[in-house]
């Protein structure tokens, strides 16, 4: 990146910061949260692409919620929950909450699970809707991670959000060649409680095997090996390709080169968000009286 590009990016960051400050003051003055604030997005990417690195930054920037679709739903009698300081909210926890509260959704899900079945797409969509309406963090928007995985799920999600007049703004795919992921995945380190991820070579923690924020130990997942990764990638590509095509057709899909170092990937994400702000009108438009 040249000197001019760096200065352009610096000015963009300044404008973004000022715009956020103006919006914050306007909210304090009126007591209302504007519909254009925050972010409403899907974050896609294969294992090792860097979602665990970028999602917490997005969450911090927009003060939004991070909803993660877990591989399996909670089973009856399973009281396992995420650690208290985990910044994500998994669908398993959402489901347990619905069952514990004995909501209509929870009762319906419990019947299916007691019979040994898997919860339907309608129930998952219902859980996400309930989370958006009751989770205070979701006032700043949301990141959906691992959902939707099929076109029917994407269509159902769009329908639900349209009814709430809060359509998706972005479907961002972190793209990286499969061959590069092997080197990444075998050196990946994870902070179990928060989901923050590091890499022993490409994105090392400040202190050896310790989380930068809490100082707690980092671990390497048992399935972070080349053989397991190849199997996971086959599944990922089979699931994701149709969904990517769906969002390409809706016009909200953006691709980011995830082979870059994490700081550059973050700058690319900021450019995506800045472009969205320009469409909705930011501080420069206000100063120009447009």
Image: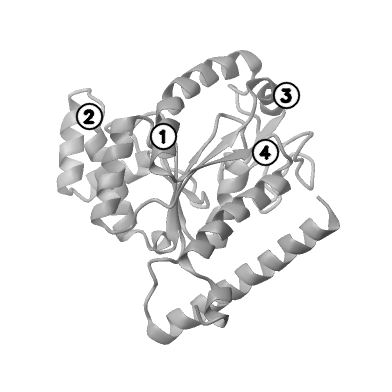
Other residues around mark 2 within 10 Å, as few (<14) / some (14–19) / many (≥20) = some
Between residues 64 and 14, which one lies in front from this camera angle?
14
Which mark is first along the chain, 2 or 3? Answer: 2
Residue 281 image position (x, y, % from top left): 49, 69
Judged from the image, the secondary structure of the residue bearing numbered disc 4 is loop
Q: Residue furthest top?
A: 227
Between residues 172 and 188, which one lies in front from this camera angle?
172
Work out how far the residue at label 1 is from the one at label 3, CA to CA, in angstroms.
Answer: 25 Å
Between residues 220 and 46, which one lies in front from this camera angle?
46
Circle number at residue 113 = 2
Work out how far the residue at label 4 is from the one at label 2, CA to CA, in angstroms.
Answer: 34 Å
Observer-side mark, 4 or 3, equals 3
Q: Can residue 96 be seen in the rendering of this structure?
A: no
Rendered residue at 72%/48% (across/down)? 263
Judged from the image, the secondary structure of the residue bearing numbered disc 3 is helix
Residue under numbered circle 3: 183
Residue 274 image position (x, y, % from top left): 58, 60
For residue 255, which quarter of the picture? top right
């Amino acid at each position: 990146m040249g000197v001019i590009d760096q200065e352009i990016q610096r000015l963009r960051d300044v404008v973004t910061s000022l715009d956020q400050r103006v919006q914050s003051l306007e909210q304090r003055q009126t007591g209302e949260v504007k519909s254009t604030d925050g972010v409403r997005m899907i974050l896609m990417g294969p294992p090792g692409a860097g979602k665990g690195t970028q999602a917490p930054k997005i969450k911090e920037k927009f003060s939004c919620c991070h909803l993660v679709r877990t591989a399996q739903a909670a089973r009856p009698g399973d009281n396992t929950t995420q650690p208290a300081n985990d910044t994500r909210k998994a669908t398993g926890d959402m489901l347990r909450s619905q069952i514990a509260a004995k909501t209509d959704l929870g009762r319906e899900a419990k019947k299916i699970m007691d019979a040994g079945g898997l919860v339907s797409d309608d129930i998952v969509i219902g859980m996400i809707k309930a989370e958006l309406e009751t989770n205070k963090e979701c006032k700043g928007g949301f990141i959906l991670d691992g959902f939707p995985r099929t076109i029917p799920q994407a269509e159902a999600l769009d329908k639900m959000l349209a009814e709430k007049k809060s359509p998706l703004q972005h479907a961002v795919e972190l793209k990286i060649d499969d061959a590069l992921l092997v080197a990444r995945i075998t050196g990946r380190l994870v902070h179990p409680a928060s989901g923050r991820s590091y890499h022993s070579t490409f994105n090392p923690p400040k202190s050896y095997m310790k989380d930068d924020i809490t100082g707690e130990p980092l671990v390497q997942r048992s399935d972070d090996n080349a053989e397991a990764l190849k199997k996971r990638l086959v599944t990922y590509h089979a699931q994701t390709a149709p969904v990517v095509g769906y969002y390409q057709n809706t016009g909200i899909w953006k691709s980011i080169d995830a082979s870059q170092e994490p700081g550059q990937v973050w700058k690319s994400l900021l450019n995506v968000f800045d472009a969205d702000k320009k469409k909705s009108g930011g501080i420069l438009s206000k100063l120009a009286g447009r």
